[in-house]
Amino acid sequence: MEKNKKMLKQEYRQNPRPMGVFLIRNMVNDKVFVGVGLDLEGIINRYKFQLKMGKHTNPRLQSEWNEFGGDNFAFEILDQLNLPDGPHANPREDLAALEDLWLEKLQPYDERGYNERKLSREEKLRRISARRADTF
């Protein structure tokens, strides 16, 4: 039995999991949330669990999940990436670029969705600089 467990674990680690971009759609008002994951099945399961438990980190999404109920939300896979080849391949960079493309296309902000707009490079640097100035 222990050997079987070890073999299953090894098999799981060796099989690449699908990575990519997913969407949570509120079917009542058509608002959406766009997210990414290195393991799509895992991230979708985590989000479903957090929402069911009332512990999701996105308060607007959580509030409407509570208001309309989980049956009124659909989880969809928008795009998948193949595992990049080579020792220097970085799937996180590819995922970030793919996420940016979908965010630009769908604009899931404000009344259209649950995503927060990403800070520009300049704004990130400004905030870092301000924090550093506060610590001295």
Image: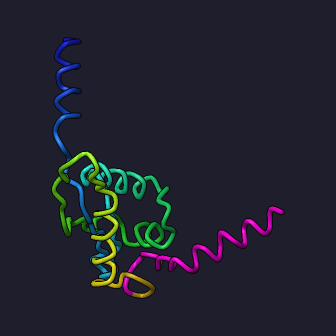
Magenta span has 113? Answer: yes
Query: What segment carries the magenta color?
Result: 112-136
Task: Reply above or below: 134 against 6.
Answer: below
Left or right of 107 in this view: 18: left
Rendered residue at 50%/80% (across/down): 120
Q: Nearer the viewer, residue 56 or 125?
A: 125
Most common SS among magenta residues: helix
Residue 134 location, quadrant: bottom right
The answer to whether any part of residue 37 appears in the image is yes
Residue 64: x %, y % from top left: 43, 73
Rendered residue at 43%/70% (across/down): 61
The answer to whether any part of residue 72 appears in the image is no
Left or right of 12 in this view: 42: right
Residue 104: x %, y % from top left: 32, 83
Residue 130: x %, y % from top left: 72, 73
Residue 110 location, quadrant: bottom left
Q: Residue furthest bottom?
A: 111
Quarter of the picture holding the C terminus: bottom right
Q: Residue furthest right?
A: 136
Quarter of the picture holding the N terminus: top left
Rendered residue at 25%/68% (across/down): 74
Magenta span has 72? Answer: no
Task: Reply above or below: 87 against 22.
Answer: above
Q: Nearer the viewer, residue 74 or 2?
A: 2
Residue 94: x %, y % from top left: 28, 63
